Image: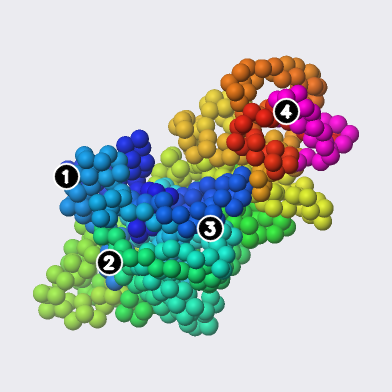
Amino acid sequence: MNATTVDGFNPYRISRAGIDWESPTDNDPWANIGYWGDHQIAYLLALLESSERHHPGHISSLLTAKRFSYADVPYRLASFDSLLADPKNTISFDHSADALSQERVQEFGGDGRLLWSNGQVLLVSLAEKLLVPAMSKLANFVPGGGIWMNTQRPEWNDANNALVGNGISVVTLIYLRRYLEHLGTLFAPEDELSLSTEVNDWLERSIWALNGEPPHPEAGDEQQHRFRLMSDLGSAFSEYRDKTVGTGFSGVSLARGSRVLEFLRAACHHLDATIESARRSDGMYHSYNILHLDKEGRRARVEHLEEMLEGQVAILASGLLSLPESVQLVTALLKSDLFREDIGSLLLYPAKQPVSFLSKNVIPEDRLATNELLMRCLDVDCTSVITRDVSGACRFGADLVDKEAVSSALDACLTNPILKNLVVEYRADALEIYEEVFQHRLYTGRSSSMHAFEGIGSVYWHMVAKLLVALQRTMQRFSGDSRSSTEMAALVNLYRVIRSGMGPKKSAADWGAIPTDPYSHSPSHSGAQQPGMTGFAKEEVLARPFELGLRVDAGVISLDPTLVHPGEMDREARIVRFRNVSGVIEDVELPADSFILSCCQIPIVVKRGKDETTTISFSDGTVVPSEGLTVDVRTSGEIFRRTGLVQKIEFTICE
């Protein structure tokens, strides 16, 4: 929380030296700037949820504590009007602010990169730090579309980096919806919250904007409604940045928890309407869309991209689907073009082959005939705009790399008396034809142009592992509901189908690499690639405990056998050497048909028997048996604090 910026984004990275950001460097084409928004809300949410599971109420107790700082990243986001004009060029680098930060670093160390006020690091409340990223993301909300990706960096998946500027992410919107819902559990109406004055003003402007437009617009008003709400939220964010970024705040205001809760409710109503509209006819959900802006007409149109795995993972993790809906979605997913039969796993996007080089830049004859300007350019041999090749195909000039270049070429035609009036009349249509031919807005990046590195035909193992975690979240929501036993069994079976396609379940020959190493991706032409500390490893760490039954909810440890597979059990009794919480190596006896795992360095033995029971062994020799598969909250707390009071836990699950 101490590393997010006043405008609600993350720095580039955090190391032992403190926070860091990318800086422009002369003659270095890789020295780019921009806010990396990917995973920001999702993983902050994961940390908050984990805290609430282990220490319920702890985060709420910190809401008013002024212990939290802002990162002073020297990026300056463009105004909302500039954003509309050029959404791909939205951030400038403040060299003087960067130099000031470096001076502070020399004197104070890593804290010099934080925001300072009156000679010291500015500290604000946790309530403020939780709200600012939410309002920042919401300021880029496109109704019926997603979150606008306009900070010059990918919002979620780097393989889709060309979508920046034109793209809108349903994935981020769904995680934002879940984040807002979780915030609603932390605040109470009677809370008195300390917010910086400008943050409080921004909160009130956001509430006004959300309440000023209905979540579901009237028929025929969709595009105007979309633009109005975008403008109201975006302008409020723009004005807030003008007052605070690089300078800090003018003072502190008191906000009621009831106002925060009103903001959260209003935002969720709007996001729910967009999530509802994101459902595809095949039962899956859109992941990314394309934004088309008509600034003069104050309209905004949304164009859908093809199905992608990220959207399905996000909606499954959202908590918005029922158990039958979850089963239907995963079933549809495994029958879709995203499923790769040869490897038994899921692609990020359908494996569409790119068109051949000579098939590109061909203007359809029937479309050409509708534009007299382009036809006359052919007649007068204006090759800078259009040419007809030896095969008879008409193509735009070879130097016309984007719409701006086309517009410049048309400007040059104004000096030609034959073309002058036609340029005025047909310019807009000529630019539209150019976009129809090249479809630059639909270009996603290496995901649609390369055959590796999460590209065409590649299985991206991080996202498949995220799917496992999302399915587990669904199972945990409905665990213990006897009315859902049939659907739960179906979901468990689908989970195992997906798990069977991953490395640990395959031979080295099938995997094309060492199966137990975490890999980045598997392209269609070879085995798994790029081993290392990938996102695959991180998600597997999150997924594995519940596969062994371990759950923590509301400060209580329990054993949930939903996913425990008989194959996890050792058939024969054995002795396992275990380093306990005190660092002492001890022997743990495992009976036949059992396995061992640990929680906070406390050994947990899971075995089969006639009844569900829990036995807790304490370090003083006391052994306490109980019915069921739950450790009481007090003992769970001792385990979390690693006090050494608990020596071992044994869970017995039914045979």
For residue 505, what is the image quadrant? top right
Mark 3 residue element: helix
Residue tagged 4? 618
For residue 318, what is the image quadrant? bottom right
Residue tagged 3? 179
Residue tagged 2? 242
Q: Is residue 499 visible from the viewing direction of this image?
A: no
First in sequence: mark 2 vs mark 4 = 2
- Answer above or below: position of 99 versus 211: above
* Pointers 1 and 2 in contact (C-beta within 8 Å): no
Per the picture, the main secondary structure of the magenta-coloured stretch is strand
Magenta segment, which residues? Answer: 604-630
Measuring from the top left, give residue 205's x and y in whole percent: 41, 74
Find residue 115 and name its label. none
Q: Could you give the CA–CA distance between mark 3 and mark 1, rounded to whole angstroms?
A: 40 Å
Q: Amino acid at mark 2?
A: Asp
Mark 2 residue element: helix
Q: Amino acid at mark 1?
A: Asp
* Pointers 2 and 4 in contact (C-beta within 8 Å): no
User: Which mark lies nearer to you, 1 or 2?
Assistant: 2
First in sequence: mark 3 vs mark 1 = 1
Mark 4 residue element: strand
Q: Residues within 10 Å of mark 4 (few under 14, many from 20)?
A: some
In the image, is 157 to the left or to the right of 644?
Answer: left
Residue tagged 1? 26
Q: Could you give the CA–CA distance between mark 4 and mark 3, rounded to whole angstroms?
A: 38 Å
